[in-house]
Amino acid sequence: MKSRIAAINAYRPHVKLGESVQKGELVRYLADRTGVNEGEISLMLAELRDAVIFFNRSGRGVKLEGLGTYLPSIDLNGAFSIDYRLDAALKDGLNSGGKFTGVIENRTNIGKDADALVEMWNKAHSDDKVA
């Protein structure tokens, strides 16, 4: 018997991820767009990382306008981590005006609710239905 979550995940729309952009490619992209040399951009990215760590270590969040906020947190065992809160500008930029150029798998299922996806699963898998 298939779980409800597994059936939904099989039919829900999702972005087919391409290869992740690594630091070198990001540095070249930024250098081409800004005129700043690659070495300086690489150094600035490292300094930005170190600044987030420095301020988070003192209990202070770091807000990067247009990107998000990095906040220190602690778990029950005393291990620290950094929580990230997405800036609305990123989400808005991704959703603006049909500019997404990636691949969406199960695109035809956009707008369907979980019950509809489970029903699709059950019709296609009569021998392994969701309870």
Image (cartoon, rainbow, N blue to C red):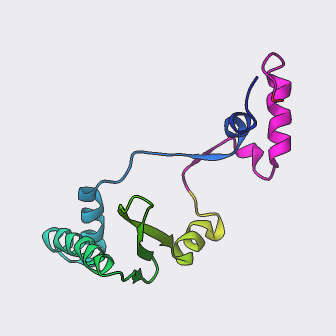
For the point 82% across and 49% down, the residue is: 113
Assess whether residue 119 is covered by the magenta stretch.
yes
Identify which residue, 1 or 104, lies in the foreground.
1
Q: Looking at the image, which residue sits at the far top?
A: 127
For the point 52% across and 76% down, the residue is: 87
Q: Quadrant of residue 71?
A: bottom left
Locate residue 108, reporting x and y percent.
76, 44
Q: Quadrant of residue 83?
A: bottom left
For the point 35% across and 61% down, the residue is: 79
Placement of 8 over or under 102, stated as above or below: above
- Is residue 12 shown left or right of residue 86? right
Q: Quadrant of the C terminus?
A: top right
- Is residue 66 shown left or right of residue 122? left
What's drawn in magenta, residue-wise? Answer: 101-129
Q: Looking at the image, which residue sits at the far left?
A: 39
Q: Looking at the image, which residue sits at the far front?
A: 77
Assess whether residue 46 is covered by the magenta stretch.
no
Identify which residue, 57 or 11, lies in the foreground.
57
Q: Quadrant of the N terminus?
A: top right
Number of callouts:
0
Locate residue 97, reporting x and y percent.
65, 69
Placement of 11 over or under 24, stated as above or below: above
Identify which residue, 20 or 57, lies in the foreground.
57
- Is residue 45 shown left or right of residue 37? right
Locate residue 40, reporting x and y percent.
15, 74
